[in-house]
Image (cartoon, grey):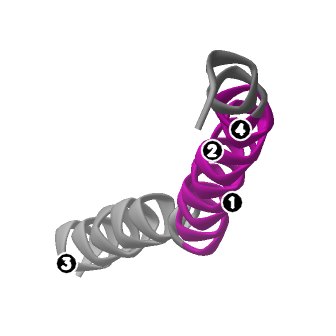
Amino acid sequence: MNLVGALRRSFFAFPNNFQKLWEKTKKKIKEKREFLRKTSFRPNRFFHIVVIQKLITVNT
């Protein structure tokens, strides 16, 4: 194989590898976003339940 053939092959392989890396990164970001979306209000719900329970026990 000559130098031009080797350079051409590596030139076309680089964008493909970059695209795969970008797709992996996008997938991880999407997974984190989904996780945060599902769990965003749960700590607040727990806090409100504890506060309401405490108010009920103090008033009785």
Labels 3 and 2: the sequence-earlier one: 2
Q: What secondary structure do most residues of the magenta stretch adopt?
A: helix
Q: Position of residue 57 (x, y in %)?
A: 19, 78
Labelled pair 3, 2 in contact (Cβ < 8 Å): no
Please say if 44 is above or below 15: below
Of the 4 image quadrants, the one containing the C terminus is: bottom left
Tell me, yes or no, whether the highlighted magenta stretch contains residue 35: yes
Q: In screen coordinates, is 39 left or right of 49?
A: right
The first of marks 4 and 1 along the sequence is 4
Contact, mark 1 vs mark 3 (Cβ under 8 Å):
no
Element under disc 1: helix
- Comes first in the chain, label 4 or label 3: 4
The amino acid on which the numbered mark 1 sits, given as a three-letter code, is Lys
Location of mark 3 (residue)? 57
Which one is closest to the eye, mark 2 or mark 4?
4
Which amino acid, by three-letter code, is at mark 2? Asn
Residue labelled with disc 2: 17
Marker disc for residue 30 = 1
Q: Secondary structure at mark 2?
A: helix
Helix, strand or loop at disc 4?
helix
Q: Nearer the viewer, mark 4 or mark 3?
A: 4
- Tell me if residue 1 comes above or below residue 57 in the rendering: above
Q: Which mark is residue 41?
A: none
Q: Earlier in the sequence, mark 2 or mark 4?
A: 4
Count residues near mark 3 (Cα–Cα under 10 Å), then give few for <14, some for 14-19, many for 20+.
few
